[in-house]
Amino acid sequence: MVGRISNVNLADVQAVYAGPGGELWELLMGDQIHVGGEADTVVLAERAGICAASQVLDVCSALGGPARSLARRIGCRVTGLDATPRMVNEAVRRTRKAGLAGRVSFQLGDALALPFPAASFDVVIGQDAWCYVTDKARLISECARVVKPGGIVAFTDWLETGSMNKMEWEAVHSFMVFPYMETLKGYSALITQNGLTVIDAEDLSSDFAAHLDRYLRELRERHRSTLVSNYGPEMVAEVLSGITLWRDAAGRGKVGRGRLIARK
Ligand SMILES: C[S@@+](CC[C@H](N)C(=O)[O-])C[C@H]1O[C@@H](n2cnc3c(N)ncnc32)[C@H](O)[C@@H]1O
């Protein structure tokens, strides 16, 4: 790891998801803003053993698509936590509209200071979002605190998978507004340090470049004109070059994605 982009903080990430960035990622990924969409949520839920009786916390829940999907498919209760007011407000609105407000709720808050007592949840999940969090050690310790003994912490995330020089590292991180990314090994160490046992640490990087390539194609072929009229050609050019940079870094094994499952 080269370091951390010192000037990326929570306010920068909130600005992304309050504005065009949030709209762009929804356009490309849907209301489940992670690689693999609902199918990936189903796999995570299976690996985490989520059942109808589970109380689930989704840390960095964005628009709440995964939370609604879990409640609808499995019947569990889900609390979503996100730091961006636009995301929380949208998640609440869409959940009411879907008739799921009895089982799914959302709270505005910081993943680094989870506003819940210790041992509140059976399962804590996160999907492709913890890469934005500025202190992964504190994040994992917060997740470990709020999960019940015997409970599960299960998440996917975008990872650093190969060595990059300082210029490459800064370009990759600053486009996404990530302060830094963890490695699979780094997350496993943080989990163990917090007294949890890693059940599975899976490298999902093999199709990561293909996913990024698909986002690029869709941007060019389906969304370009809408985006140009909404945000202007410079912004669209910047996004195309940023995603190309990521696709190429993924193709060269420098960035990737993984899934971790741990038991308290
Ligand atoms: C990629 S989206 C999450 C997608 C979501 N997990 C899903 O699968 O639909 C990233 C989200 O993380 C939230 N976020 C970033 N840092 C956060 C923090 N420290 N605390 C809470 N939420 C945070 C952002 O507001 C944004 O909504």
Image (tube, grey):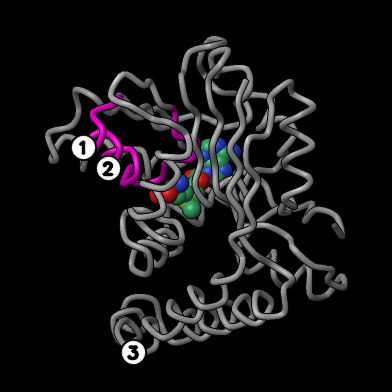
Q: Quadrant of residue 118?
A: top right
Quarter of the picture holding the N terminus:
bottom right
Confirm whether residue 83 shows in the render.
no
Whether the residue under disc 3 has CB within 8 Å of ligand 1: no
Residue 10 in percent (x, y) is at: 61, 43
- Amino acid marked by disc 1: Arg
Q: Residue at x 33, y 53 (%)?
A: 38
Residue 133 in percent (x, y) is at: 64, 43
Badge 2 density bin: few <14, some 14–19, many ≥20, Cα 10 Å: some
Q: Residue at x 31, y 54 (%)?
A: 31
Secondary element at image label 2: helix
- The numbered dot on residue 69 is 2
Residue placed most toward the observer, 66 or 205: 205
- Amino acid marked by disc 2: Ser
What residue is pinned by disc 1? 72
What residue is pinned by disc 3? 221
- Amino acid marked by disc 3: Glu
- Please report the bounds of the magenta region as a residue range: 57-76
Badge 1 density bin: few <14, some 14–19, many ≥20, Cα 10 Å: some
Quarter of the picture holding the C terminus:
top right
